[in-house]
Image (tube, rainbow, N blue to C red):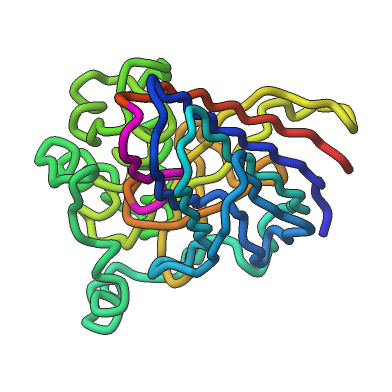
Amino acid sequence: MNGWQVRVVHRTGYKYASPATQSYNEARLTPRSDRRQSVVATRIETTPATRAYRYTDYWGTEVTSFDLHAPHTEFTVVATSVVETGETPETEEPRYDTTWKELKSDAVIDEHTEYLQPTKYTPRDRELASVAKQLRKGKDPAHSVLAISEWVHDQLTYRPGSTGVHSTATDAWRAREGVCQDYAHVTLVMLRAIGIPARYVSGYLHTRPSAALGETVAGESHAWIDAWTGGWWAYDPTNAIDIGPRHVWVALGRDYKDVAPLKGIFTGGKGSTLDVSVQLTRLA
């Protein structure tokens, strides 16, 4: 595989105003191996220590669940992974020979119906649907995916803090700004509006293409889209680039809700503060 070897350290820390007596959590922080990336090592550690249970969810994401039944004022989850990444193999490049007629077939709609339906984060939007239909004119499905992704990239302004984790695609579109989650959600709304099955991908992006070996950069979780045009393939609308060696994918779903890195509940505590950091290091 001609690519990178990347170490990802994702740290999430909670502090409680008063002791939490119990907490239950699910972490979607473990990369999976596929045709483009190979997971070398991965682990999730908690402080205080907990007993962890692992399973694969409905969407194919590896989930680590853990619970804590002792009073605590702080709780930290550290996910560390080493992943070898590469370019998408030429044999897996977007399939440009898939027709609109094939996408409308009962077999395709039946198999991918969950990635064609609106969700809370990706609701139907008349304006976005109208633009998507204009952009698809004269193009096959795969080229329509590229046209729509690049249009979203051009229309939205990347502005951290302008939206929140609960913002919908419509919220971001009305504001004309957002972060990677919003770029992905707006793109998904448009692709689904013209009958292209599309799903949300969460992961990480190493932000420095010229990084030296051993150099660590501060980063954040990243998001992009997978589209089905005869086969699944991914594209990054936030940066208008193909998925490459700097991308590490972790989870798949219909929208952000299906792939949230960490979610859970606690009793007691009287409120909490959250601190998240992501560090990426090119190892090879």
Tell me residue 231's x, y (percent): 48, 70
- Above or below for 73 versus 226: above
Tell me residue 56's x, y (percent): 49, 69
The residue lying furthest to the bottom in this view is: 107
Seen in the image, is 210 located left or right of residue 126? right
Q: Residue at x 49, y 46 (%)?
A: 202
**Is residue 110 a member of the stretch shown in magenta?**
no
- Above or below for 118 versus 179: below
Tell me residue 268's x, y (percent): 31, 34
Quarter holding the N terminus is: bottom right
Q: Which residues are magenta?
A: 258-269
Q: Residue at x 53, y 58 (%)?
A: 64
The residue lying furthest to the left in this view is: 126
User: Across the whole image, how many numbered discs are drawn on residues?
Assistant: 0
Q: Quadrant of residue 41?
A: bottom right
**Is residue 267 a member of the stretch shown in magenta?**
yes
Q: Residue at x 22, y 55 (%)?
A: 194
Q: Quadrant of residue 175?
A: top left
Seen from the viewer's position, the closer of residues 112 and 121 is: 121
Q: Quadrant of residue 262?
A: top left
Quarter holding the C terminus is: top right
Q: Residue at x 38, y 23 (%)?
A: 18
Seen from the viewer's position, the closer of residues 271 and 153 is: 271
Seen in the image, is 172 located left or right of residue 251? left
Tell me residue 197's x, y (percent): 32, 62
